[in-house]
Amino acid sequence: MIINNRPVFLNLFQFRFPIAAIMSVGHRASGVLMLLCVPVLLYLLQLSLQGAQGFARAQEILQGGMGRILLLPILWALLHHLLAGIRYLFIDFDIGVSKQSGRRSAIAVMLAAPLLAIVIGFLL
Amino acid sequence: MSRQASGLRAWAVQRISAVYLGFYFIYLIGLFLFSPPTSYEAWQGWISHPVAGVGLLLFFASVLIHAWVGMRDVIIDYVPIFLARLTLLTVIALGLIACGLWAARIVIMAGTAA
């Protein structure tokens, strides 16, 4: 632990967040959200494999109103996490590290994730 | 565990599991978009195929290890109180292990079902 007396400014409401920072927070938030979905997913998987009746019940839950409403934010979380993750992998290999290209790719992730979520959610 | 999943090793594990998860999700989205299982028989047939079953088990293993490294990073960043941090990490570790065992049970039992 280093002790110093430098001033600390941590007022989150006065911070200006660049788009890459907002994308990064989204990466973490989507990860936590998906972790909470794991038990639900396992429950549905188990149900769908308990004979024809269970399969029909799982289908009913997924295609019902509640399932449809929840599908969109979960698809967004998945796609945002996936796209932002691919972006980080490129940056690990020194591709797109500059300030300008980092900003551009962050904007691309922020836009592509919700758009793809709507398209895939519509097709599913 | 936390000594095994920290520093360079956690960094590498996170990326290797990420690559598997990325490809697996693209495969899953493709499967459900282009040839979704429409009956219990088709679904059970898919999961009891050895390649699909092992691929799915590997997927759950990757999810759990990826989630552990990620949650550990998030909690270390945002939970400074030692007792709260320890409690949260313990709950998550036990929860992830329980989910892993549950997933293994589902996939193995589905494979042996008639």
Image (spheres, helix red, strand yellow):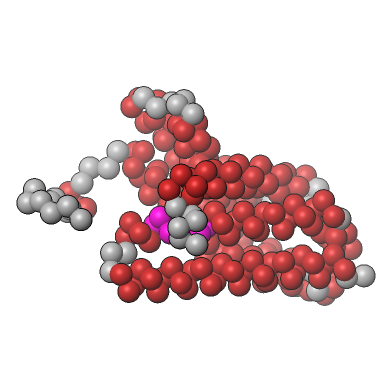
Magenta highlight: main SS: helix
The residue at the point 59 percent across, 64 percent down is: A38
- Figure quadrant of residue B66: bottom right
Q: In the rendered view, would you say B65 is above or below A56? A: above
Please give the name of the residue rendered at 36% of the width and 24% of the height, measured from the top-left corner: A98
Residue A111 in sight in this render = no
Percent from the top left, x then y, of residue A67?
A: 62, 65
Can residue B86 be seen by looking at this rendering? yes
Q: Position of residue B103 (x, y in %)?
A: 69, 67
The N terminus of chain A: image quadrant = bottom left
Q: Position of residue A105 (x, y in %)?
A: 44, 31
- Look at the picture and state if B105 lies above or below B20: below
On the image, which quarter does residue A106 sit in?
top left
| Farthest residue, direction right | B114
Q: Nearer the viewer, residue B112 or A75?
A: B112
The answer to whether B20 is drawn above or below residue B101 in the figure is above
- The span picked out in magenta is B67-74
A78 vs A43, left or right, is left
